[in-house]
Image (tube, rainbow, N blue to C red):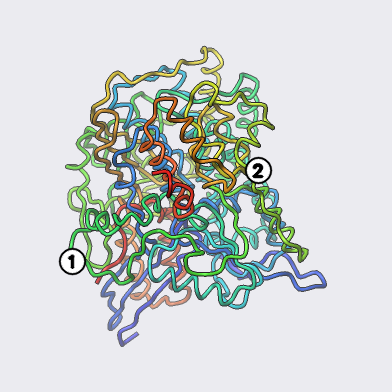
Amino acid sequence: MSKTERIEIEPLARVEGHGGIRVEIKDNKVQNVEVRILEGPRLFETLVLGKTPEEDLSIVPRICAICNLSHKFAALRGLEKALGVTVPEATQLYRELMHHGEMLESHSLHLYFLALPDFLGYDNAIAMAEKYGDVVTKALALKKFANKVMRIMGGRMIHGENPILGGFGRLPDHRTLQQLREEAEGFLPFAMETIDLLASLEVPDYMERETRFLCLKPPHDGYGYYGDILLASDGKEYDVEDYKSVISERVVGHSFAKRGRYQDRPFTVGAIARVLNLGDRLTGKAREARDRLVNERWYRNPLYNNFAQAVEMVFSLEDMVRVIDRLLELDQPEIARPTRETGVGTGGVEAPRGILLHHYEIENGLTVSADIITPTAMFLDDVEAFIRRASESLLSKNELDNFELRLEMVARAFDPCISCSTHLVTVEFE
Amino acid sequence: MSGTKTTTSGGESKGRERPRLGIYGLTGCAGDQLLLIHTEDHLLDIFEAFDVRSFVMASSNPVEEELDVAIVEGSVSTEEQREHLLEIRKRAKILVAAGNCATAGGVQAMYAKDGSFAERMRRVYGDDVKFVTEPIEGSPLDEFVTVDYYLPGCPISQSQVLALLSRLLHGEQPEPYPHPVCHECKLRENRCLLLDKKFCLGPVTLGGCGAACPSNGVGCTGCWGPNPDGNFEEHFKLLQSFGMSKDEIIRRVRNYGGHKILQYIKDLE
């Protein structure tokens, strides 16, 4: 490659939404790397203005189908803070159950169907089924179970309206809970087999570089997927209400997307950030899985995000059992009511692909301002940095076979959600 | 990494040509494509029965040639997407609009044709921005091309999409489903929320969701778009009798009504 060459990967396949990667190379040197976001603008922050919290809760999950309940959960947390709603323990646990459903759905979809074909050398999971039929069949069953949890708690598989301010429209009966508990336990052996399968894979190192990791710190001693404190891998902690001063937003020339930065540098969020920052809090099989898979390369290699997803699948299955056992002891919760009509609140939830923040200002029961920062908007800068590193190292070693696939793998490992990132501002401009 | 490459389609052709299928997403949440991926028990059947040429959300290496059936989700929200849609239309014998964004424009079209798009764009992007691809206010596919079949929904219904694919597979016409949400709510023997003076758009909204929300005691938000047989005037009067203003009712019915609601409310505002 002596002359200028442009490598374009478009469309970026097996991700959610419409995106692409562009790498410009001149005299064997990487000039420019762009992760292009090609979805049109939807202007969600303007869609909720003048709306009631009830309408907000219905509209904002439409940002993304895969993590629709994360958006619902984050919006609930933000709006309930703003309006002074305190939910009872049982409601909180039902939300955790709901969120485990989404975590399992998203992780199983991404790990088995979008990412594993890369590791095993196939175009898609259907083609992979010829040799790995058992894995694909069990993975489909696991995903189906996760979808069932989402359907029961969300009210529909995608965009259910069952979670409402202060509670749920309808709650599952004890028999349904017991069935879910049994099924969750039944999938644990498969989740552990997946850990074995991953432990046997060779993970390439062509993109490795140091980065930092951010996640939410749970409000208890355990592992979990929500919180009011931002925890960074440098050990620093911040109140989530101060998110604007922690995660600075940057406008880049090639894309109108704002990009998140921590201390003016790119950072990673998602399963890998959580397992690295919170892994010591894991217990049981999830702890075994983490101890088996985590090594010091995780800090430099985003492909291990797929491994972290497998660890979290084990955690979610085990924690569903804990949550259900506790719910079986509790009475059905009442719906908690707002104590005021005006207020401000930031809701923080770990979506499958990382920190998701929903900030609302409500005046006299109507939304006057909303700010939504999605995990994909946070890590896009880091995706570019890893793709640049990958391009440089592959060029320097003259490893040009499957060059594009290898770059695509890096992007895919982050599990980018382009619909999510695009609701902000992401049409490219000159 | 080991690896033999295989073709996009899993199954072998069995004696006759399988119809060529392309699945595309424009601007939206990707929920309608995801719903297809979520058909677990039938996903392998779809790949077996159809020659799936393009489905980039699920597979690499699409083949963009002639198609028997194209399923398109999402609204047209940029000039590039408008051109892409025209190009798909040229290649496809049958074009199916899947989901609220493709059929009505989606939530991003809730202010359709009220002239606020330019201002809202400015509010988010600022002034003097030159876009590589010109943004378009979220519009349904039939603003630009002829659509052969519609699968409404937010998201679409699994049983409806599988029924449509089965019909097309056998060279038959898919059937329309012109029933309101109330029809399905009655079949589920729910107590009508309107009797308790709760807000619900079930009577004026297309069914097919199985009355998902009213079955949980949550009023219908209208996310499948307007039911053409709905009596909007009477329903708005009923909701007003609950103490809601007409402005709020119209605001709510527009949340998911996109372009398609406009004809039903034009004389009611």
Question: Tag 2, which secondary structure?
Answer: helix
Q: Is A238 situated left or right of B196 in this image?
A: left
What is the distance, in whole Å, between disc 2 and disc 1 at their CAs?
Answer: 51 Å
Residue at the spot 32% in from the left edge and 69% down from the top edge: B134
Question: Tag 1, which secondary structure?
Answer: loop
Seen from the viewer's position, the closer of residues A390 and A155 is A155
Above/below status of A224 relative to A42? above
Q: How many marks?
A: 2
Above/below status of A170 relative to A150? above
Which dot, 2 or 1, sits closer to the camera? Answer: 1
Seen from the viewer's position, the closer of residues B218 and A116 is B218
Amino acid residing under circle 1: Asp
Q: Chain of mark 1?
A: B
> Could you say where residue A207 lies in the image, as x and y percent from the top left?
36, 62
Above/below status of A84 relative to A226? above
Residue B144 can be seen, yes or no: yes
Look at mark 2 in the image and give the residue it sits on.
A141
Q: Chain of mark 2?
A: A
> Could you say where residue B50 lies in the image, as x and y percent from the top left?
70, 65
Look at mark 1 in the image and give the residue it sits on.
B128
> Could you say where residue B125 lies in the image, as x and y percent from the top left?
23, 58
Q: Is B35 situated left or right of A166 in this image?
A: right
> Could you say where residue A312 lies in the image, as x and y percent from the top left?
48, 39
Residue at the spot 68% in from the left edge and 48% down from the top edge: B159
Image quadrant in which the C terminus of chain A is located:
bottom left
